[in-house]
Amino acid sequence: MQNDQQISESFSLSPYFVDDSKTPGFNWERFQDKIDTLPENLYGLLADERTADFIGSLTRSHAQLNVRGSDIARIIRDVVLADIYIGDMPAQISSKLGVDQNIALEIARTIVSQLFAPVIDDIKKLQLQKFGKLPGPSMPQQSSAPRPVPGADLPETGGNIIDLRSK
């Protein structure tokens, strides 16, 4: 059974529970209205204990974040709710957590590739509805399009070039 400190830490690292109606500047009713319209899998991501565990692991792997887990939880929540554009996540991480851009980009990529991976299509859908665009090349995206074969656009050379990768 978890002790009170573990439960408190789990709540402070949960994107769903990190703020409540008593948090200054947080509009609980607006938050609940958005939660009510979310696809179930996105609500699950916000409320799941494994998300809090992921954030805890992320903060432990970056020493400078050891007390900033609740801020990461808020950023994740705001991206999932489309309050923050996913492509702005590295800048948000950098400014709110006080880390340089390279570390912020590494953290954002970890969040997208590991935490958001199972629900990325729904996140993209909400992001597109809200912002009218999807993230650019600075954020990792899962692509189903095949990579172009280098040299495929070269003119025919009379049969002197054999592409062994296509065999």
Image: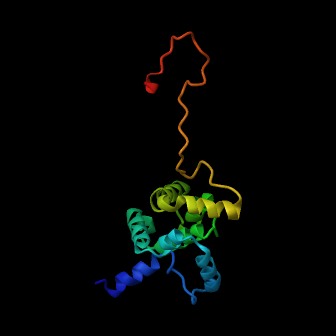
- The residue at 60%/24% (across/down) is 153
Query: Which residue is pictured at 52% across the width and 53% down the height?
Result: 102
Residue extending furthest right? Answer: 132
Is residue 91 among the parts visible in the rendering?
no
Q: Is residue 26 above or below residue 82?
A: below
Residue at figure coordinates x 57%, y 86% from the top left: 23
Query: 159 or 1, which is in the foreground?
Result: 159
Residue 142's spot in the image, x, y percent? 52, 50
Total labels: the figure holds 0
Residue 4 image offset from top left, x and y in percent: 35, 87
Left or right of 78? Residue 133 is right
Res 52 seen here: yes
Q: Quadrant of residue 75?
A: bottom right
The answer to whether 24 is drawn above or below residue 95 in the figure is below
Q: Position of residue 136 (x, y in %)?
A: 63, 50
Residue at x 58% of width, y 72% of height: 38
What is the quadrant of the N terminus in the image? bottom left
Return the x and y of residue 126 as percentages of the image width and height: 63, 64
Residue at the limit of the structure toward the left, as seen here:
1
Query: Would you say 9 lies left or right of 84 here?
Result: left
Q: Quadrant of residue 130?
A: bottom right
